[in-house]
Image (cartoon, helix red, strand yellow):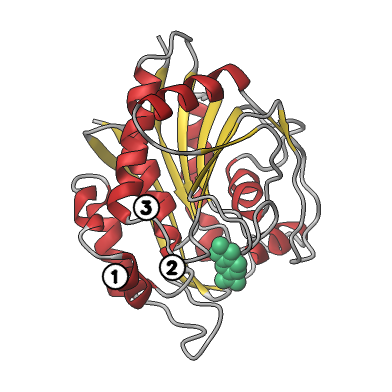
Amino acid sequence: MAEIVGAYFTSHVPSIGGAIHKGLQQDPYWKPFFDGYARVHEWLAEVKPDVAIVFNNDHGLNFFLDKMPTFAVGAAPEYHNADEGWGLPLYKSFAGHVPLSWHIIEQLVADEFDITTCQKMLVDHALSIPFELAWPDVDAWPVKIVPFAINTVQHPLPSAKRCLALGQAVHRALQSWQGDERIVIIGTGGLSHQLDGERAGFMNRDYDLFCLDHLATDPAALTKDSVHEIVRLAGTQGVEILNWIAARGALGEQAAEIHRNYHLPISNTAGATVLLEPA
Ligand code: DHB
Ligand code: FE
């Protein structure tokens, strides 16, 4: 039977890609952030996942403001990286796990989630940067992926409660999967940040620490606020915490934190890295 080995959460700021490209991991600005990944590398080498279920958000590459699915699920054999405008290098393509994608999609629809199915999907920095951070210097990614794109961009956004429920439904789907894969759940984005408008540069350490303190043991606490309240607390792009909440749901009921790093600012964002294991 397939095993969920744990969950890896990380910010996905595009300039991390630039820092990796320039080898700035030991630079005083970047070091406190990159130091948080040594434990991630160690952990991934221990738990050896071969599939990743990735909850992230599209930044205008697949879906623009004119057509925006609330929840989109990839069912492609291959996902190519593309740059939606940050000038990042193009990263290796990602192999999809097509049968597992369809199993999850079928179970979600049976569970009354009205998702968008994508047999073609590009992936942007929200997926490539977390992978570059987790598996630096590999020739090919060691995991196949099933990517979820959650709308964190064009209002109305799904509620935090709905995102947690989506993740929990994905967890049930994984429990009825007959394969013997070792599955890692990945949630990307956040934490607090706002890139535009009057509050550009806004971050909120108190709210971030509230989210980090409750993620493992009481994720429902993160669903008490409306999406508009989360925008107020975390910033317009800080709502990417919805990806983390969905990923937390997919991990399963009981979880324990085994690693956390929090450092701000990274570009305009409070950078965070977390590892959870099923408890
Ligand atoms: C930044 C953060 C993001 O999550 C993103 O998608 C783009 C930019 C930033 O802090 O620069
Ligand atoms: Fe983002």
Mark 2 = which residue?
238
Q: Residue at x 20, y 50 (%)?
A: 220
**Dots 2, 1 in contact, CB < 8 A:** yes
SS of the residue under disc 1: helix
3 vs 2, front mark: 2
Label for residue 207?
Answer: 1
Residue 242 higher or lower than 115, as above or below: below
Q: Which residue occupies the extreme bottom position in the image?
A: 198
**Mark 2 belongs to which amino acid?**
Gly
202 is higher (above) or lower (below) than 39: below
In the picture, measured across the screen, residue 77 lies left or right of residue 146, that is: right
Q: Earlier in the sequence, mark 1 or mark 3?
A: 1
Q: Secondary structure at mark 2?
A: helix
Residue 30 visible somewhere in the drawing: no
Q: What residue lies at 63% left-to-right and 39% top-to-bottom? A: 135
The residues tagged by marks 3 and 2 sit, at their Cα atoms, a distance apart of 18 Å
